[in-house]
Image: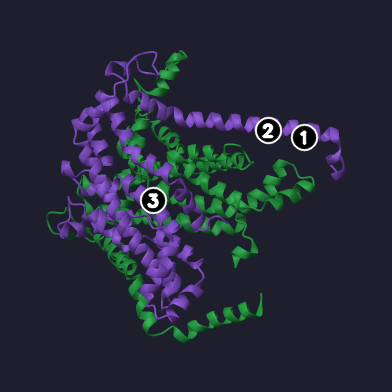
Amino acid sequence: MSRGSALTPRWRVGYTVQKRLARALTHMALLAMVAVLFVPAAWMISTSLKAPQEVYLFPPKWVPSSLRWENYYHALTIQPFHIYLLNSFLIAATGTLGRVLSSSLVAFSFARLRWKGRDILFLVMLSTLMLPSQVTLIPQFILFKELGWLNTFRPLIVPMFFGGPFFIFMLRQFYMTIPSELDDAARIDGCSSFEVYWRIIVPQSGPALATVAVLVFQGRWNDFFDPLIYLHERMKLTASVGLLYFRNEFGGAHWPQLMAASFVCMVPLIVLFFSAQRYFLQGIVFTGVKG
Amino acid sequence: MSTVRRLAWRVTRWRPALRTSGRENIEGWLFASPWILGFAFFTAGPMVAAMFLGFAEYDLITPPKWIGSANYARLLRDPLLVSSLKVTSIYAFVRVPLVLLLSMVVATLLNTKLRGLRVYRTMFYLPSILPAAAVSMLWLLVFDHDYGFINSFLRQLGLNGCNWLGDTRYALPSLIVMSLWGFGGSMIIYLAGMQSIPTEYYEAAEVDGAGPIQRWWYITWPLMTPILFYNLVMGLIGSLQVFTEGRIITNGGPENATLFFVLYLYRNAFEYFKLGYAAALSWVLFLYVLILTLLVFRSSSAWVYYTSELKR
């Protein structure tokens, strides 16, 4: 079609109708997908509020005849689930603190200081991003066992204080965007490197640090493998592993309670997501995969 | 560039040569030391140790015993190793393309200046950040033979459902379907990329008479290939390490149909207490991931489009 024809009135009318139709179809397709995505979740929440016999009802009921909120109470008390949640929170929170502090310090070194071996080590660090963690798992486990750290939170927290490659990379990319004239000015005023980091870089990196914090917290809260192998005592389990124990002990007999517990395990992240969605989305921008 | 800025640029470029040594050198290492120490103690050291441990028999109680290459020889004739590698590969090679396709389609639909974009984005993204263990429980209920959502639904239509998780034919596909639930993670990356494409490109193409499909193929697609590449590499690496679903939902069954490689490794280490063999297995996984990643990197020059600026 030529440019001229695009400007004739009749064509334009057809064009907008076509556009509206396309838009409506797009909405329909997306809404259908949202529905497919949320049906399982809705089923979970519905089940979590049912009386046991209603789970087995056929045809299935979407809205339980009476909402059994006590399922949540039972789910959290049949097993010490409140302790599991607290443990998860402790592990995730201290891990986040450690990872944010250490990663930001290392990122500062990679972004702002000039030292021998920096660029090679940076490449090494990037390549560890692709390393499957299992290859270090067995010796790490033996190391923590020899240190007497099995069945404590230490194997889950201490490594967090040694930085995380992905987050170091992310923060380094962000620090590079802060004008280095600021550093130079501060140094002329007699600031040490640490002061430059603490007084210049950190105050300007609020959003980036928040992004890292949010992503680390999510990762630590969701972690299943490490707590599974390192924690054995009931009172030390995390929520994720607690769910597995719950299921193994009660099997299919307690569907409503199991779903209630699973949902409770998701709630902190749902809350975090809605209160800090901005930071979740920013993570993508900082890594520079944005093209 | 103004003269002042050019001068400033020169000065800043220049200074490092003068100052590289001494104090800043020490400080650099000091500031980076958390990661350097972590790398030595938690990554490089254990990696090497794992290779040596592969030559030993160790059950955590009696001291490790050197048994030469017996573990590595066993790798070659371990039927469960072969089957778990196969299961894991099928999972990865089916799941990753599906996720990439689905997320590309949805990102494209969302990138049409749609009303409600933010709401959609949230809805699609949310499932991908939830704890895998809890999500596994949710899907356990969906797939359950007797009370599951899918079979209840099918029964209402007068159909007999399948034993999704108990049948060797359906267990693995069920887990793949479940994993698609989290496609929002890669979708959101595409979407961010698409939104950063200057609209002038599309306007220019429209003026030249390109339809929506042509615009997508000649503008969106090439500019998205670096992101596709990133999602592909990360998706493959992640999928080859799948564990939680296999442990919680099926625990490897039925008849090892969902015995993923990491689950097999986990069993060897923490259920059979053959830590030496598990260490040897971990190296198999490492090499597999490495080779696959290298292949994908190799292929990238053929299909990943870098703008000259990025290539530099």
Q: In the rendered view, how is the structure colored?
A: by chain
Q: Nearer the viewer, residue B229 or B251?
A: B229
Disc 1 target residue: A15
Q: Nearer the viewer, residue B137 or A168?
A: A168
Instruction: Please give the chain letter of the residue carrying mark 2.
Output: A
Q: Helix or strand or loop: what does disc 3 sit on?
A: helix
Q: Are marks 1 and 2 on the same chain?
A: yes
What tint does the image give chain B?
Answer: green
Q: Report the residue at 62% width, 33% height from top.
A: A26
Q: Nearer the viewer, residue A283 or B40?
A: A283
Can residue B250 be seen here? The reply is no
Disc 3 target residue: A214
Instruction: Please give the chain letter of the residue carrying mark 3.
Output: A
Q: Earlier in the sequence, mark 1 or mark 3?
A: 1
Q: Nearer the viewer, residue A93 or A168?
A: A93
What tint does the image give chain A?
Answer: purple
